[in-house]
Image: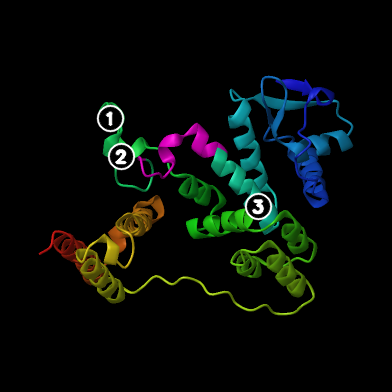
C-alpha cells in the first residue's frame, strides 16, 4: 500500500541522513524502482526507511510504498534500532548506546533469554522452566548477544565490548571520544578508569594525542592456578568462617560467576556457524576436541570431590 509522506511520523531521536546513501538510493529507484517498501506501525510511525523517504522527497514524490508492521511500542523501537545498526555506519559510541537500549528492550520482550541467578539464558538451568513438550528445543530464542552478533555479522565479544563502553563512559567523556574520533581500543582503556574526573582527564589526554597509563585488568587464572587457589580457599574455609580467606557466600558467588562464563563460552560453539564446521573435521581433530572435553569434565569431577571433602 501507499502512504502520504507527510503523514509519516519520524522519531526525533533517529540518526541524521547519510547523503551518499540517499544519492545511491535515488539512482537505484530511477533504474529499478523501490524494491523494499518502508516499514511503519499502525499509527504511521516510521520503523525503517528514513533514507528511502528522503530519496522520494528529493525526487518529488508525495507518496511512498509501505508495509504496515504488526508491531508497536517496544517491538517497534527494537525494529528501528536494528535498522540503525544494520544499515548505518555508526561510530562505536552511538553503536554501543543503541546496543545497550536494544538489550534492555530485548530482555523485557524475551525474559527467557536473560541470564540471572533464577534462570534464563547461558545458565544450563532451563529445566527450572515449565516445558510442555510441544515446542522443539531448537526453536528456543537466541540470547541477545548471539542474536545481535548474527545480524551484525560480528563476534559476540565485540557486542559485549561495545555495550561495556556505552555503560562505562560518562556522557561528557562520550562527547570527547566522538568529537576527537578516539578509537574503540582506547575507549575500553577509559572504561577501566572508574573515577569520572580521572576518566575525563585521560580522555582529554587521548584527544591531545598523548598516551594514557594502562589500567590493570583482572586476568583469569590458568586451570592449574585456579586449582591451587581453590584448594587454598577450601583449606581456609575448613578452619571456620571467622578464619576464612573470603566469606563463604562470596566464594559461592565467585564460583557461580566463573561457571556461568564457562557455560556461556562453551555454548557459543553450538552456534550454526560452528555446526557447519564439525563434519569437516579430520579424525585427529575430532579426537583432540574429545580429549579437551574429557579434560574439562575431569577438572569438574575433581572440584566436586574437593567440595565433598574427598
- Left or right: residue 164 compared with residue 25: left
Q: For the residues marked 2 and 3, what is the alpha-carbon distance in whole angstroms?
A: 31 Å
User: Image height check: is 119 above or below 62?
Assistant: below
Residue where numbered disc 1 is placed: 131
Q: Find residue 242 and report its image quarter.
A: bottom left
The magenta span reads: 105-119
Mark closest to the chain's N terminus, 2 or 3: 3
Pointer 3: residues within 10 angstroms few (<14), some, or many (20+)? many
2 vs 3, front mark: 2
**CB atoms of marks 2 and 3 within 8 Å:** no
**CB atoms of marks 1 and 2 within 8 Å:** yes
- Left or right: residue 62 compared with residue 299: right
- Left or right: residue 35 compared with residue 59: left
- Left or right: residue 103 compared with residue 228: right
Judged from the image, the secondary structure of the residue bearing numbered disc 2 is helix
Residue at (86, 29) in percent of width and height: 61
Q: Nearer the viewer, residue 119 or 36?
A: 119
Residue where numbered disc 3 is placed: 95
Q: Residue furthest left?
A: 310
Residue at (65, 49) in percent of width and height: 97
Q: Quadrant of the C terminus?
A: bottom left
Q: Nearer the viewer, residue 185 or 292?
A: 185
User: Image height check: is 290 above or below 36?
Assistant: below
Residue where numbered disc 2 is placed: 126
Q: Can residue 126 be seen by looking at this rendering?
A: yes
Amino acid at each position: 500500500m501507499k502512504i502520504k509522506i507527510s503523514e509519516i511520523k519520524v522519531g526525533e531521536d533517529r540518526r541524521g541522513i547519510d547523503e551518499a546513501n540517499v544519492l545511491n538510493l535515488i539512482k537505484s529507484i530511477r533504474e529499478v524502482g523501490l524494491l523494499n517498501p518502508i516499514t511503519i506501525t499502525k499509527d504511521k510511525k516510521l520503523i525503517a526507511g528514513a533514507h528511502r523517504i528522503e530519496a522520494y522527497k528529493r525526487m518529488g514524490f508525495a507518496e511512498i510504498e509501505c508495509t504496515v508492521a504488526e508491531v508497536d511500542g517496544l517491538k517497534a523501537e527494537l525494529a528501528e534500532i536494528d535498522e540503525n545498526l544494520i544499515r548505518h555506519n555508526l561510530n562505536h559510541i552511538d553503536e554501543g548506546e543503541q546496543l545497550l537500549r536494544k538489550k534492555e528492550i530485548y530482555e523485557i520482550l524475551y525474559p527467557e533469554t536473560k541470564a540471572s541467578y533464577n534462570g534464563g539464558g547461558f545458565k544450563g538451568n532451563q529445566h527450572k522452566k515449565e516445558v510442555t513438550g510441544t515446542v522443539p528445543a531448537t526453536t528456543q530464542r537466541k540470547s541477545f548477544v548471539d542474536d545481535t552478533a548474527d545480524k551484525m555479522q560480528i563476534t559476540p565479544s565485540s557486542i559485549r565490548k561495545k555495550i561495556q563502553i556505552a555503560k562505562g563512559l560518562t556522557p561528557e567523556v562520550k562527547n570527547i571520544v566522538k568529537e576527537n574520533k578516539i578509537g574503540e581500543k582506547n575507549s575500553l582503556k577509559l572504561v577501566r578508569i572508574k573515577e569520572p574526573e580521572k576518566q575525563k582527564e585521560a580522555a582529554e589526554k587521548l584527544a591531545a594525542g598523548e598516551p594514557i597509563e594502562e589500567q590493570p585488568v583482572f586476568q583469569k587464572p590458568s586451570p592449574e592456578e585456579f586449582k591451587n587457589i581453590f584448594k587454598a580457599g577450601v583449606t581456609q574455609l575448613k578452619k571456620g568462617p571467622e578464619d576464612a580467606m573470603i566469606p563463604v557466600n562470596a566464594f559461592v558467588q565467585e564460583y557461580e560467576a566463573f561457571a556461568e562464563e564457562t557455560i556461556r563460552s562453551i555454548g557459543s560453539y553450538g552456534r550454526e556457524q560452528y555446526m557447519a564446521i564439525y563434519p569437516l573435521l579430520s579424525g585427529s581433530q575430532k579426537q583432540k576436541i574429545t580429549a579437551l572435553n574429557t579434560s574439562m569434565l575431569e577438572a569438574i569431577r575433581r572440584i566436586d570431590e574437593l567440595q565433598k571433602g574427598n
